[in-house]
Amino acid sequence: MDPVTMVFYAVVCGGLAAAAPSFQSRAARLVVGTITGIVAASLLPLLRRVFGI
């Protein structure tokens, strides 16, 4: 894994971990985590093109 990908996912996971305790149920955390992962995986290629990385 290259450093840009690692930093991007670290930021996304860190933000999710900070927000996760506010969701009371395990199912809510699972849904939010799944949606966040899909959005992050979809945005990374676009961001790489935009910033020329």
Image: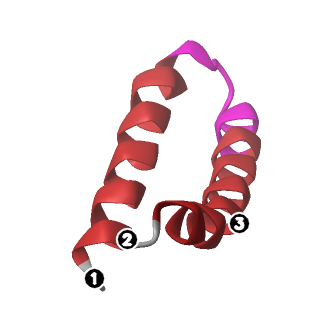
Residue at the image position 51 percent from the left and 69 percent from the top: 48
On screen, 29 above or below 49?
A: above
Q: Which quarter of the rendered picture does the C terminus lie within?
A: bottom left
How far apart are the alpha carbons under marks 3 and 1? 17 Å
* Residue of label 1: 2
Label ID, residue 28: none
Q: How many marks?
A: 3
Q: Which residue is mark 3?
A: 42
Q: Is 39 colored magenta in this rendering? A: no
Q: Closer to the camera, 37 or 5?
A: 5
Question: Which kind of residue does numbered mark 1 sit on?
Answer: Asp
* Residue 24 belongs to the span the image colors magenta: yes
Q: Quadrant of residue 4?
A: bottom left
* Percent position of residue 27, x then y: 75, 39
Residue 21 lies left or right of residue 7; in this view the side is right
SS category of the residue bearing label 1: loop
Q: Which residues are magenta?
A: 22-30
Local secondary structure at mark 2: helix
Mark 2 and mark 1 in contact (Cβ < 8 Å)? Answer: yes
For this orientation, the residue located farthest to the bottom is 1
Q: Residue at x 71, y 54 (%)?
A: 39
User: Which numbered disc flags the more N-terminal residue, 3 or 1?
Assistant: 1
Identity, as a three-letter code, of the amino acid under mark 2: Thr
Q: CA distance from mark 1 to mark 2?
A: 6 Å
Which badge, 2 or 3, comes first in the chain's sequence? 2
Instruction: Find residue 23 and report its horizontal and vertical position in percent.
Output: 63, 20
Place residue 37 in its image quadrant: bottom right
Please provide percent x and percent y for residue 30: 68, 46
